[in-house]
């Protein structure tokens, strides 16, 4: 082979590589222009009902209207949300399988399952958009002789080890929140885990447990009927649906913020133009009066974060909840 042949052979290979790179560069924008051209699935790591499902269905309906294609919600409950997260983590990175993540799974599970988790909250997902947050409400059984948060703390200190608190399961936000409450106030309550909010509320109404810290959806009806008593909302501002309840700051426990959040993620490697197209549509939806009103009616509030902001927020939350789980000495492995 002479020098000329070598030169032209090398030039041909370089041209082929350049063509491939150029094609890849144009493929993503072209894909974004036609996306979505078929149905999109939004996976939720919990059964129908509750905050995650509500957020997913609101987002699905809004994106379907905005992007002119079917968005289907698929409930994949079980294993503390790990089944759903793993399904989306290993799905094709094309924008047609998305995850509506609940913070109690997305940023808490890595601390609860450090050895067995089959997905990574940072490496497995491309952040798309935050859509909603929901504070918790501190409630007590109606027979407990306390009417304020300060009275609850005083009663618990006067009766050490006699009060118990319900949670929706080991390692849940209501479990961690109960331990955070104990640590911040210096009281010690006994943890009673349940399988979901339904059984926990039933036992609270029946007087079998004393305290419950949970998101509003499962509590508001019982609060309004007087079957249980609300003491405070774990956020910096009052909730319109229970506007008579003070915030924890107003009730004398500043800094005890406990909020669940719900956000949309795609599999890692999803083309950025597709992520940006989804994020733009979600932004318009979340900032609409209709979305805000529906969120408020369900004890939550609309919050938008774009891909970059959500990525930073996710990293911050991972550290916060890792520290909280460590302090509470909670392990599920």
Image: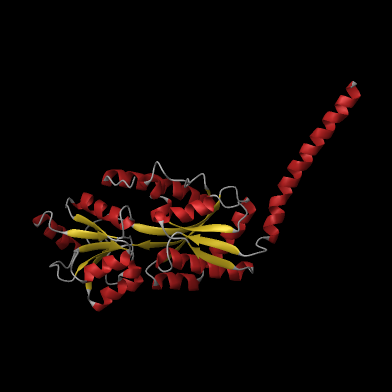
Residue 317 or residue 91, whichever sits in front = 91
Q: How is the image coloured?
A: secondary structure
- Residue displayed at 75% across by 44% down: 22
Which corner quadrant of the image does residue 132 belong to?
bottom left
Residue 253 or residue 229, whichever sits in front = 229
**Residue 47 horizontal/vertical position (percent):** 42, 65
- Residue displayed at 60% across by 47% down: 269
Residue 195 or residue 15, whichever sits in front = 195
**Residue 264 horizontal/vertical position (percent):** 51, 58
Which corner quadrant of the image does residue 210 belong to?
bottom left
**Residue 66 horizontal/vertical position (percent):** 61, 68
Q: Would residue 17 appear left or right of 123 to someone viewing this image?
A: right
**Residue 31 horizontal/vertical position (percent):** 69, 55
Which corner quadrant of the image does residue 219 belong to?
bottom left
Q: Quadrant of the C terminus?
A: top left
| Total numbered badges shown on the rendered structure | 0
- Residue displayed at 51% across by 44% down: 123
- Residue displayed at 16% across by 61% down: 152
Q: Quadrant of the N terminus?
A: top right
With respect to residue 39, does 224 lie above or below? below
In this view, the residue farthest toward the left is 158
Q: Would residue 316 appear left or right of 174 to someone viewing this image?
A: right
Residue 180 visible: yes
In this view, the residue farthest toward the top is 2
Residue 256 visible: no
């Amino acid at each position: 082979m002479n020098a000329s042949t070598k030169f032209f052979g090398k030039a041909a290979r370089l041209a082929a590589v350049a063509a491939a790179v150029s094609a890849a560069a144009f493929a993503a924008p072209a894909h974004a222009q036609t996306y979505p051209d078929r149905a999109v699935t939004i996976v939720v790591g919990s059964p129908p009902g509750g905050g995650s499902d509500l957020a997913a269905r609101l987002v699905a309906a809004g994106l379907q209207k905005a992007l002119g294609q079917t968005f289907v919600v698929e409930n994949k409950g079980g294993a503390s949300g790990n089944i759903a997260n793993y399904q989306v983590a290993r799905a094709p990175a094309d924008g047609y399988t998305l995850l509506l993540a609940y913070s109690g799974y997305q940023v808490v599970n890595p601390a609860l399952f450090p050895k067995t988790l089959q997905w990574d909250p940072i490496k497995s997902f491309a952040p798309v958009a935050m859509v909603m947050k929901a504070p918790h409400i501190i409630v007590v059984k109606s027979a407990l002789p306390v009417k304020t948060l300060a009275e609850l703390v005083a009663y618990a200190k006067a009766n050490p080890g006699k009060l118990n608190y319900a949670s929706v399961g080991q390692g849940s936000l209501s479990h961690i929140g109960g331990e955070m409450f104990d640590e911040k106030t210096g009281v010690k309550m006994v943890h009673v885990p349940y399988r979901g909010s339904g059984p926990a509320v039933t036992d609270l109404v029946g007087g079998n447990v004393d305290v419950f810290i949970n998101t509003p959806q499962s509590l508001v009806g019982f609060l309004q009927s007087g079957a249980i008593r609300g003491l405070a909302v774990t956020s910096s501002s009052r909730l319109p649906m229970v506007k008579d309840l003070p915030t924890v700051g107003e009730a004398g426990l500043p800094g005890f913020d406990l909020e669940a959040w719900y956000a949309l993620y795609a599999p890692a490697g999803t083309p950025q133009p597709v992520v940006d197209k989804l994020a733009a549509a979600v932004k318009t939806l979340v900032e609409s009066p209709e979305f805000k009103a529906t969120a408020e009616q369900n004890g939550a509030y609309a919050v938008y974060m774009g891909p970059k902001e959500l990525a930073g927020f996710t990293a911050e939350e991972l550290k916060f909840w890792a520290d909280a789980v460590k302090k509470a000495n909670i392990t599920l492995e």
